[in-house]
Image (tube, helix red, strand yellow):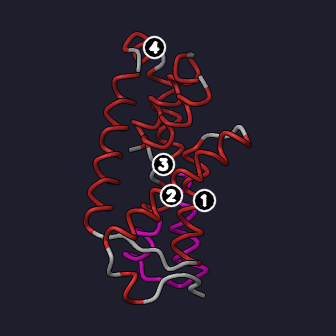
């Protein structure tokens, strides 16, 4: 069910960019109002926009999204305190491996045995469901104030292990 855009509007790069920026702004306002991390609201709004108003991307939007993701990953890496990483490497590695392999094995088993996908397709489903986004975790940690605490440092380190 596509509510807003016709085929001519979907070809207008500037209209698509403006709508995406408007949705990001709306997400920020909602996040402030509800006091939850903006990254989480923006993800939900992106899902809704992509599915209900047929809002797609173009090469310009994909470049900006990729650049932002790389920038946030770099900032998250710079945020990790090396002393905390050295002292908490065992829990970080343990959490990182578990946070990868538990969803990987669960999604792979579901795809293979319940959905009856091929072995290779099941492995891809497992990988797709088990990766984390360091950029999203970092944004949530910064907004919640956990990035400067030992627990937040542990979570960020575990995300890097998972990736």
Residue at figure coordinates x 49%, y 55% from the top left: 130
Query: Mark 3: which secondary structure?
Result: helix
Q: Can residue 113 be found in the magenta stretch?
A: yes
Q: Is residue 117 above or below residue 43?
A: below
Principal SS element in the magenta part?
helix
Where residue 35 sits in the image (x, y, percent)? 71, 37
Please, what secondary structure does the residue beneath circle 2 have?
A: helix
The reply to whether dot 3 and dot 2 touch (C-beta < 8 Å) is no
Please, is residue 91 above or below residue 69 in the view? Answer: above
- Per the image, the residue denoted by label 1 is 44
Q: Residues within 10 Å of mark 4 (few under 14, many from 20)?
A: some
Residue of label 4: 84
Above or below — where is 154 with respect to 101?
A: above
Q: Which callout, 3 or 2, points at the residue further toward the start of the chain?
A: 2
Span highlighted in magenta in the image: 102-126
Q: Earlier in the sequence, mark 3 or mark 4?
A: 4
Residue 70 x/y as whole percent: 30, 43
CA gap between label 4 and label 2 equals: 39 Å
Instruction: Name the residue tied to disc 2.
Output: 22
Which quadrant holds the N terminus? bottom right
Label 4 or label 1, whichever lies nearer to me, is 1
Q: Is residue 6 placed above or below 146 in the rendered structure? A: below
Q: Nearer the viewer, mark 4 or mark 2?
A: 2
Which residue is at a point 37% across and 70% down the rendered structure image? 57
Element type where label 4 sits in the image: helix
Q: Name the side, left or right, on which 58 lies relative to 138.
A: left
1 or 3: tag closer to the N-terminus: 1
Q: Secondary structure at mark 1?
A: helix
Residue 100 circle label: 3
């Amino acid at each position: 069910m596509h509510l807003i855009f016709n085929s001519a509007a979907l070809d207008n790069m500037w209209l698509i960019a403006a709508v995406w920026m408007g949705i990001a702004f709306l997400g920020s306002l909602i996040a402030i109002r509800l006091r939850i991390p903006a990254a989480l609201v923006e993800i939900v709004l992106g899902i809704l926009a992509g599915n209900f108003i047929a809002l797609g991307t173009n090469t310009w939007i994909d470049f900006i999204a990729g650049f932002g993701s790389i920038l946030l990953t770099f900032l998250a890496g710079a945020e990790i305190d090396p002393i905390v990483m050295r002292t908490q490497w065992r829990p970080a590695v343990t959490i990182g491996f578990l946070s990868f392999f538990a969803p990987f094995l669960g999604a792979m088993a579901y795809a293979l045995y319940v959905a009856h996908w091929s072995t290779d397709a099941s492995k891809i489903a497992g990988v797709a469901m088990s990766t984390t986004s360091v950029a999203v975790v970092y944004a949530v940690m910064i907004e919640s104030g956990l990035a400067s605490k030992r627990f937040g440092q542990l979570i960020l380190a575990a995300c890097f292990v998972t990736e």
